[in-house]
Amino acid sequence: MKRTSGVLLHVSSLWGEYGCGSFGVAAREFIDFLSDAGFSLWQVLPFGVVDEYGSPYKSHSSFGGNPFFVDLEELHKKGLLTADELLSARQNSPYLVELEKLQDERLELLSRAASRLSPEERERVESFILKEPYLEKFAHFMALRAANNNAEWCDFVTDEIDERIYFAWCFIQYEFRREWQAVRDYAKEKGIGIIGDLPIYVSYDSSDVYFEKENFLLDKRERPTAIAGVPPDDFAKDGQVWGNPLYDWKYLKKNDFAFWADRLSYNLSLFDGVRIDHFRAIDAYFSIPAGAETAKDGKWIKGPGKALVNKINAVAGDSIIIAEDLGVITDSVRSLVEYSGFATTRVLQFGFPASPDNIYKPHNYPKNSAAYTGTHDNNTLLGYVWELTPEARRELFDYCGYAGEDFSEGCRSIIRTMLASSADIVIIPIQDLLCYGRDTRMNTPGRADANWRYRLTREQLDTIDKDKYKHLNRIFGRA
């Protein structure tokens, strides 16, 4: 693999005027920034519809795109939205994703745009959706949810749908794909690859489960028999109860992992590679009794292992695959990652304070790895440095060759050390390039609210020294 570097920034965090980042001008401006700074990768988070807290990891579909990413100004240019409608969608603040406003207003606005399509445009939407069966099922599912007052599918009382709502979701998926393809084409012109994110699990309240119940462990009432999560760890003392239904791996293996192959193929149609979230669950997954309030009563169960890895490799071909092998990592997990050939994950924040042989210290990074200062689940680098003990902070700064006491300069020395490491891929969250504190972190695991809201402005991006990072990427063979 060629030595590369990139930046982690979700589309929702891009700047703009309408409460959430989108596939509009800002996406192209960010690609320009990456190119000018010598980076060659843009890593994003999952593209699915977010839950009520804004999380993209508990979506109503593994395939459906987030409607908030559709560029309203593009729809205005096409005559599908009026100037007054654009004005009504304007945000109150540029610094946060305005989730409540988006949830209250955006779908109705996009439905109005869909209703104004010409007959020829409607035909293009219908032709597109016929070729995308998973997206058609998603649109149908969302129309069913609307007809049932957005209840979970296990509580549906009618299967009658409003055709206007159904078509609106078809249109959203068509426009989502069309706009994203234009962004991706622009990235290719600039030499920027895009890494997506494949959540290990799907939401119970999703078209995935509703239409393909046989893929999941459900009881006779079609409720989960056990749910996903992780045991107590440094992130959460009681563990985490995610609530996702667990896969019926016996059935999936018998069916040649068709659902997983389809999920991966879909993501690789959008991206140049993917990070597989919580990869260790492929080796062994944590099963929590349905209804449990904490993860303390859960247990590890053997996962599909090499059989699924073989299928992933067959589908992925030469695409970049990053295995997020964090958390409770056993020899069995390490062996499976090595067998897979996927890039293993290394996060600097797990390396200090620790002994010199700690795998998260940069001098121990293997070549086939993706190294991060932190992930979307971590504190920002500055927040992490701030909260270290003085002794641990001094150890980290000394390790990175920084003799001073300024935290921001110390963070820049850490990033330089990461870029100098042997890891083929180095990914830096945008907050770390900006040297921002914990108030800008993307997610705090184990807490449902006050996450996924971070946004930056164009003015903030312009404070980053692009020439400096272009120089560093060049001298360390990443440009």
Image: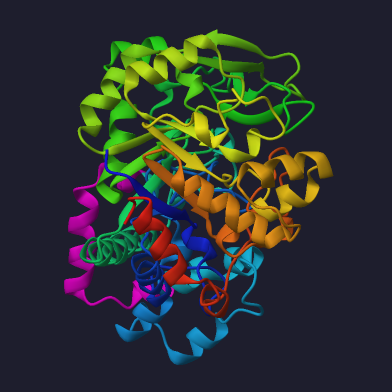
Quadrant of res 197: top left
Residue nearest the observer in this picture, 416 or 103: 416
**Image side of residue 412 versus residue 256, left or right:** right
Magenta includes 375?
no
Which residue occupies the extreme bottom position in the image? Answer: 83
* Residue displayed at 60% across by 44% down: 151
**Image side of residue 425 versus residue 299, left or right:** left
421, above or below 364, in the image: below
Residue nearest the observer in this picture, 165 or 231: 231
Which residue occupies the extreme right position in the image? Answer: 390
The percent coordinates of residue 291 (x first, y second) are 72, 22
| Quadrant (top left/top right/bottom left/bottom right) for the N terminus | top left
The percent coordinates of residue 232 (x first, y second) are 73, 23
Quadrant of res 170: bottom left
Residue nearest the observer in this picture, 240 or 393: 393
Residue nearest the observer in this picture, 300 or 42: 42
* Residue displayed at 70% across by 29% down: 240
Residue 20 can be seen, yes or no: yes
Highlighted magenta segment, given as a residue range: 112-137
Report the magenta stretch's main SS: helix
Count of all numbered marks drawn on residues in the image: 0
The percent coordinates of residue 393 (x first, y second) are 75, 44
**Image side of residue 392 versus residue 225, left or right:** right
Magenta includes 131?
yes
